[in-house]
Image: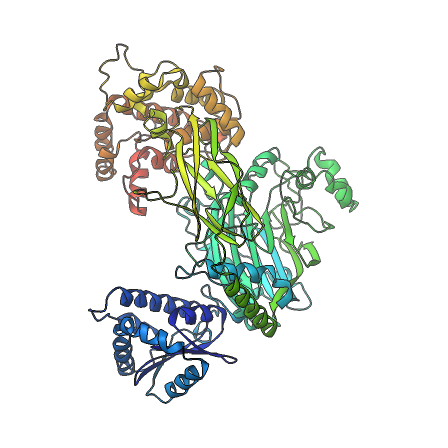
Amino acid sequence: MKCYITDPLHEIQNDIVSCVLYLILGADTKVRVSYQEEELELRLPFGSHSRFFLSEVNRAWSEVCKSTTQTPKFEWISKYHKATRGQGVVKQALAPLGTTLTKLNQHRKTEKSSEKKGSSEKEKGANSGTQNSKQAYAVPESREDRDDLVRSSSHTTSNKAQILAMPQFGLRDNLIKCELLKNENIYTYTEDFSFFLGTYNVNGQTPKESLHPWLSCTAAPPDMYCVGFQELDLSKEAFFFNDTPKELEWTKAVSEALHPDAKYALVKLVRLVGIMLIFYVKKKYAKFISDVEAETVGTGIMGRMGNKGAVAVRFRFHNSDICVVNSHLAAHIEEYERRNQDYKDICSRLHFRQLDPTQPPLTIMKHDVVLWIGDLNYRITELDVSNVKELISKKDFETLHNYDQLKRQIDEKAVFVGFVEGEIDFQPTYKYDTGSDKWDTSEKCRVPAWCDRILWTGKNIMQQHYQSHMTLKTSDHKPVSSLLVIGIKKVNAEVYKKTFEEIVRNIDKMENECIPSVTLSKREFHFKDVKYMQRRAETLSLFNDGQVPCQFEFIQKPNESTYCKPWLTADPPKGFIAQGGSVDIELEVFVNRSTAPELNSGKEQIEDILVLHLERGKDYFISVTGNYLPSCYGSSIHSLCQLREPIQDMPQETLRDMAEMVGGDSEGNTEKPLDIPKELWMMVDHLFRNALNQEDIFQQPGLRSEFAEIRDCLDTGIPDSLPGSNHSAAEALLLFLDALPEPVVPYSSYQQCLESCSNASQCEKVISMLPQCHKNVFNYLAAFLRELLKNSASNRLDVNILATIFASLLLKSPTKQDLAEKRKTQEFFQHFLAQGSS
């Protein structure tokens, strides 16, 4: 079989695997597959569809290699023909392809021997191939066929340096990629493009005025728009179900306000509750956008809720990787540490999947350019309202900026290390009376602050303007914009081709000459006194002391589904090391709610062996050990009710025996069990005494450091009272309930709860039949929450908020919970929040 591939500049003839590699590097391409007198011709407009098609061809090829007795089916090819073409053409084309592929295996030896006859024979075969009968059809949805021009990730002519490593390709292609990236400065050059960045906290309002003064404030139309919103919708429906009609309203307002002197294509829209990011590009540049991915991360209560957090889009433009982040960090003037924590959480938890699923995900900072916008909520401190307003009236923004929390935190390298923010010469953007330019006249009389910010990191970036837009009065914030001119890397195709060919020649000489090897910094790692939800990490350094570059990967051991235990990760788990180079791998131990129960009981230990495999080389064995300090987090209600002493004072054998007890069976325990876990009582009692009137209790997150202190206090019994803020104590309670191996309402009773959710007496009957300790906990929590509701005027809680938060923790589904079930669990729990409930 022969496979011919042509593009406007080249024509090659090779086997299927080489064809696929070439296509990954190329542009719009024609493929001709021929065998004897049959030939199939396909036109592949370059992009994701072409890549998917080639993946399926490779899959079919692999099946043929395994078996030559059965005729493979290729119905999947039919989806690649245009709807305007007749089905008959496709069927006619499929027949020769099926015949050809079934005979490929027998034909391979003949093909290989004929290739040795020299280039003259190849040319002869190529010429004869063009005389064969042809059937042609095209893949659907070229860029011209799409409504918004950019709908999915794809590769373009400009990103030839970014070779897509497919599973069929191994070390050789990673060598090529590494060398191409190393020599990128040879075949790339920079060209300037303008990026308009905008951020606006709209305070849950609908668009009441044109956004044109904000989005079209530049004389020339920008090449890109990255527009971020916060607090798009403040309703409970948006918060709990992530659904809002305001997404469409604000998107429409943005599209109508883009610069009138250019036409734009919508690339991506991503939203998490009220945080939304919209990315537009000039239509003429849409074809150079590829590898588009969007991700979200919530940093609200329990570190997961989406009322605070970030949304982000990453993409490749020509040969530059760009990431845009829109974030809404923790509020309140004194919470700068929580904002710092939110920033770090976003950076560590927000990962973009790569086109090749075998490759590790990309973090925010693994991009050439990072653009960060949003309501960062950092405030002005150490000045009272009158002093701040006086400096504003004098337009002495330089002096005022010295009291800005974000500036101070950046100067202390606590956040946004390596980021740049332009000079601020506009007045603070928060807080105004809605519909006016007056500073906050409410009872709280907020101190003005630059909450809304735009920062960036990367090379070849110049800021043209950084300003607020006072004419917009919809919200209590003012929108902010920045125009950045960014030098984007582009590829010189001719120089790239020469560089690529030279690299391939050098690799051909180098291959098979030497076996790769590495030196490990150490082979034994011990993690002492690991605690629940406490990240512990050590570094393993690999040095390539061999004569050739090497590829490494942690591989699975026999009869195991992953390369490591679930409480352990290696970052990166695979990679490539140039000759004489090194790489640092972070080995991290983190015990969460899924891994804690087995470790608490002693059934599982902090012990694992990692197998580090070198492609074409040997394996290295790395020992990971440690000791885990048992915690009430991840322990069962039943076990905790048996413990009168702090859990870390108990022998491991006792904890193991208690974990094996079923239900309320306390055989062998002479003491009467506690009615509820003492740890639960300590948290609820603390909140009852200190937090009944706490504003936004159970809705605002606490500090990670304070949670650690509370956890240690509960697990050791020292001190007697809980440390930290009321918000930290409230979040510690939610995390405790979330970590229970069996929820307060056991899985066995879940279905009964759903069926009885509309009948209060039936709901009470279900609870009355729970195991005693579970029933006690349920009733105790419900009674406490009813006390909170008596103080709703000050703590701003209502039945819907508490039912939504606690129902998801007390009534968990043994399988994935759908929206209808979620609503039923809330309805069930609401019966117990009504005043006078038992």
Q: Where residue 396 sits in the image (x, y, percent)?
A: 78, 45
Question: In the rendered image, which quarter contains the C terminus?
Answer: top left
Q: What residue lies at 44% left-to-right and 40% top-to-bottom? A: 569
Left/right placement of residue 632 relative to residue 9 reads left
- The vertical placement of 602 against 799, above or below, is above
Q: Nearer the viewer, residue 606 or 398?
A: 606
687 and 612: which is toward the camera:
612
The outermost residue toward the top is: 670
Residue 334 in view (yes/no)? yes
Of residues 324 and 57, the one nearer the viewer is: 57
Q: How many marks?
A: 0
Residue 126 lies in what quarter of the image?
bottom left
Residue 501 is left or right of residue 129, and the answer is right
Residue 448 quadrant: top right
Q: Is residue 282 visible?
A: no
- Taking 205 as reference, is 597 above or below it? above
Residue 458 position (above or below residue 501): above
At horizontal 30% and vertical 85% (from top left) the residue drawn is 37
Q: Residue at x 58, y 65 (%)?
A: 258
Measuring from the top left, give residue 327's x and y in whole percent: 55, 47
Residue 700 coordinates in the image, percent (x, y) = 50, 35
